[in-house]
Image (cartoon, rainbow, N blue to C red):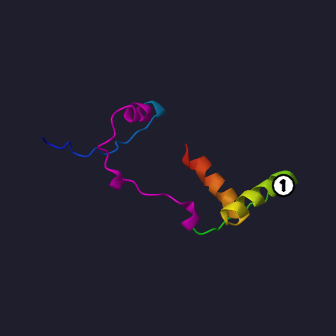
Amino acid sequence: MRQPSPKTVPVLTTDAEAEDFLDQDLSTLDFSQFKPLRFETLPKSARITMRLPEPLIAALKARAKARGIPYQRLIREALEREVSDT
């Protein structure tokens, strides 16, 4: 029996196209085409200042401590996730 050739991900320009693509059998999808994206490796050249409620800062610091990372990195990861989900 012949093995199906690996699928590649087409350029998807709309949410509907992405949903249609994901509705099919992806068991033969070639995962080698994916590359992880981490903004953490980019140089940090811009600074922001923002005021946050103390309880929120305390919760961020506690969660970051539980993960063993600085709380600023936790905030940066949350921002990265937010912009990469679009």
Residue 54 counted in the magenta span = no
Secondary structure category for the residue under label 1: loop
* Depth order, front residue of 83/34: 34
Q: Which residue is mark 1?
A: 51
Residue 19 seen:
yes
Residue 47 seen:
no
Query: What's drawn in magenta, residue-wise?
Result: 17-41
Q: Is residue 79 left or right of residue 7?
A: right
Rate crowding at label 1 as few (under 14), some (14 to 19) or many (20 or more) other CA atoms within 10 Å: few
Q: Residue at x 14, y 42 (%)?
A: 2
Q: Is residue 59 above or below residue 68?
A: above
Q: Is residue 30 above or below residue 64?
A: above
Residue 20 counted in the magenta span = yes
- Which quarter shows the C terminus? top right
Q: Position of residue 52 (x, y in %)?
A: 83, 53
**Residue 23 found in image quarter:** top left
**Residue 47 found in image quarter:** bottom right
- Which quarter shows the N terminus? top left
Q: Residue at x 72, y 57 (%)?
A: 63
The amino acid sitting under disc 1 is Arg
Q: Position of residue 67 (x, y in %)?
A: 66, 62
* Depth order, front residue of 5/80: 5
